[in-house]
Image (cartoon, rainbow, N blue to C red):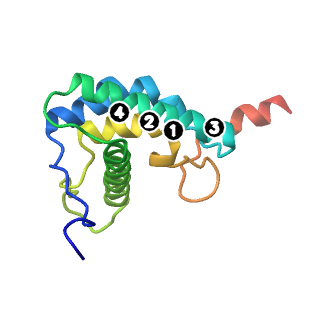
Amino acid sequence: MSSETKKKRSPNFTESEIELFVEVLLPKYKSVIENKKTDALTRGEKAAAWSRLQVDFNNLSSIFHRTEENLRNLWGELKKKARKSQAFQKRETVCTGGGERNKSGDPTKLDDKVLEVIGPSGVGLNEQYGGDAEIPETDSSSATDAN
């Protein structure tokens, strides 16, 4: 592979860049970026939102110039990490065997903010029926008194 065709690697995102992305810019664009529709109109809106997000990000961050692809990859990695830490916490919560629960993989504050943006797709749905859900007991004496 020649050096002309090889992609140049961007520097890693700094913590301040990630904070800027998650706390300032993402809430502004989350309704478009996380839209699950895939029709032509929505794809166009998403592309425009990512372009605006990139411009806003580069205007607010004076560290490195980031491309739209860089920001899309960052968002994908943040979501993956947040889902993984959420799954770890859930797995450790229901783990048996006694002893203290392992908290090393619990979600960080950044993960919590990302999970807040992505909603149920990161946390999962809570099943009321089926599985190991606790069902509140009803007072059987009040039910028999009514009859």
For mark 1, give the secondary structure: helix
Quarter of the image with the N terminus in it: bottom left
What percent of the width, then of the height, locates residue 9? 19, 56
Q: What residue sits right under mark 2 in the picture?
A: 50
- Determine crowd level at label 1: few under 14, some 14-19, many 20+ residues with C-alpha closer than 10 A: some
* Residue 139 seen: no
First reached walking from the N terminus: tag 3 or tag 4:
3
- Asked whether disc 2 touches disc 1, contact meaning CB atoms under 8 Å apart, the reply is yes
Residue found 64% across the figure and 51% down from its top: 129
For mark 4, give the secondary structure: helix
Amino acid type assigned to the residue bearing label 3 in the image: Thr
Q: Residue furthest right?
A: 147
- Asked whether disc 2 touches disc 3, contact meaning CB atoms under 8 Å apart, the reply is no
First reached walking from the N terminus: tag 2 or tag 3:
3
Amino acid type assigned to the residue bearing label 1 in the image: Ala
- The numbered mark at residue 47 is 1
Which residue occupies the foreground of this view, 56 or 77?
Answer: 56
- The numbered mark at residue 42 is 3
Residue found 49% across the figure and 38% down from its top: 119
Looking at the image, residue 89 sits to the left or right of residue 41; the answer is left
- Asked whether disc 2 touches disc 4, contact meaning CB atoms under 8 Å apart, the reply is yes
Q: For the residues marked 2 and 4, what is the alpha-carbon distance in whole angstroms?
A: 6 Å
